[in-house]
């Protein structure tokens, strides 16, 4: 069974840090682009960061660049999102998602076939 399970969410004050983890199972990690998305209450889901399958290029949305760092461990089938300098506007449910295929560009949202259940991040001012 293809599965993604996130962990590591929580509540922090502005300026704090959290590290999210995503455990992948049931598929060959190397053939997938893996992304972190987030959805704040009442807002559209948005991509946050993505590691592409072909060269492992990492893309970030502009609002998190220089604060968030995505990484992966292909041996353990894990991806991580280190979030530093958190702001109240980072409050959201964070999801990891997987898109099958070899590519070095960020797939469109609808290409992500597998999603985790999400983990809540709350940043207070």
Image: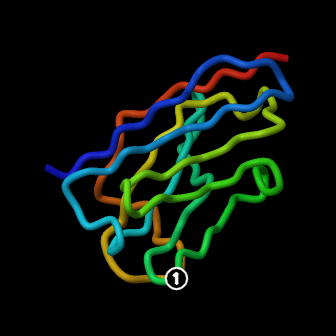
Residue positioned 35% across, 41% down in the render: 116
- How is the structure coloured here? rainbow
Q: Where is residue 18 in the image (x, y as percent from the top left)?
A: 67, 32
Where is the C terminus found, in terms of image quarters? top right
Q: Where is residue 40 in the image (x, y as percent from the top left)?
A: 60, 32
**Furthest residue to the front?**
75
Residue positioned 44% across, 75% down in the render: 53
**Number of marks drawn:** 1
Left or right: residue 69 compared with residue 110: right
Nearest the eye: 118 or 75? 75
Left or right: residue 80 compared with residue 23: right
Residue positioned 77% across, 58% down in the render: 62
Instruction: Using the image, determine if residue 60 lies above or below residue 88.
Output: below
Instruction: Write down the quadrant of residue 50 in the picture.
Output: bottom right
**Within 10 Å of the Cα at label 1, are there few (<14), some (14-19), or many (20+) other Cα atoms?**
few
Instruction: Using the image, determine if residue 110 lies above or below residue 104.
Output: above
Nearest the eye: 1 or 93? 1
Q: Where is residue 24 in the image (x, y as percent from the top left)?
A: 32, 50
Nearest the eye: 1 or 87? 1
Instruction: Using the image, determine if residue 73 lies above or below residue 1.
Output: below
Residue positioned 67% across, 28% down in the render: 91
Left or right: residue 107 compared with residue 30: right
**Label 1's element?**
loop
Instruction: Write down the quadrant of residue 101 in the picture.
Output: bottom left
Instruction: Name the residue beneath numbered marker 1.
Output: 55
Q: Position of residue 73 (x, y in %)?
A: 47, 59
């Amino acid at each position: 069974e293809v599965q993604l399970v996130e962990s590591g969410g929580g509540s922090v004050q502005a300026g704090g840090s959290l590290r999210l983890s995503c455990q992948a199972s049931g598929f060959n990690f190397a053939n997938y682009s893996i992304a972190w998305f987030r959805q704040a209450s009442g807002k559209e889901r948005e991509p946050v960061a993505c590691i592409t399958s072909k060269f492992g290029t990492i893309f970030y949305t502009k609002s998190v660049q220089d604060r968030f760092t995505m990484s992966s461990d292909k041996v353990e089938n894990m991806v991580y999102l280190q979030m530093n300098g958190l702001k109240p506007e980072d409050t959201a449910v964070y999801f990891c998602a997987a898109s099958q295929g070899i590519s070095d560009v960020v797939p469109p949202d609808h290409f992500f076939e597998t999603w985790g259940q999400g983990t809540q991040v709350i940043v207070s001012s």
